[in-house]
Image (cartoon, rainbow, N blue to C red):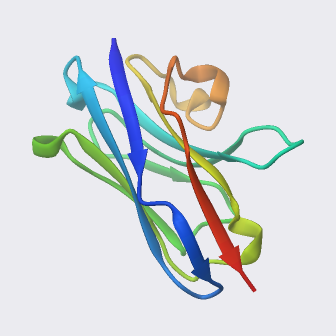
Amino acid sequence: QVQLVESGGGLVQAGGSLRLSCAASGRTFSSYAMGWFRQVPGKEREFVAALSWSGGSTYYADSVKGRFTISSDNAKNTVYLQMNSLKPEDTAVYYCAAELILTANLYGSPLGYDYWGQGTQVTVSS
């Protein structure tokens, strides 16, 4: 079992930056693949970024490539999502997710993850 708690969301103007944090507790954090997803009301949960359990591979949705960066600090059991050049369409609730065994083809699917945080709201004003 692993527990995830997101923080860092808020209101920012278009073009601004935010850094989301996801603090993990429970089993060995470094053994888990970690992902960030987002969701707006009435739409399905959307993949944003993922980090392999070894930290050696990162994956990004096309819509955020070059603007968002996923990283981790294993000493702090925390994964981050640095979001730059934010756009109004980035407005959503952002969720952190974790999974112990995840094949590469599932990094971008919410179905691949068993553990989820409660979400943090990100609002980008135009």
Number of numbered discs:
0
Question: What residue is shown at x 70% (from left), y 64% (from top)?
Answer: 91
Q: Residue furthest left?
A: 75
Residue 93 placed where, x, y %? 64, 50
**Quarter of the image where one finds residue 77:** top left
Residue 124 placed where, x, y %? 67, 75
The quarter of the picture where the C terminus appears is bottom right
Residue 21 vs 6, above or below: the answer is below
Residue 22 placed where, x, y %? 36, 44
Q: Residue furthest right?
A: 42
Q: Does residue 23 appear left or right of residue 67 in this picture?
A: left
The quarter of the picture where the N terminus appears is top left
Residue 115 vs 68, above or below: the answer is above
Q: Does residue 4 appear left or right of residue 86 in this picture?
A: left
**Front-lying residue, 9 or 33:** 9
Q: Does residue 114 appear left or right of residue 41 in this picture?
A: left
Question: What residue is shown at x 60% (from left), y 30% (from top)?
Answer: 105
Residue 51 placed where, x, y %? 40, 43
Question: What residue is shown at x 65% (from left), y 85% (from top)?
Answer: 14
Residue 94 vs 108, above or below: the answer is below
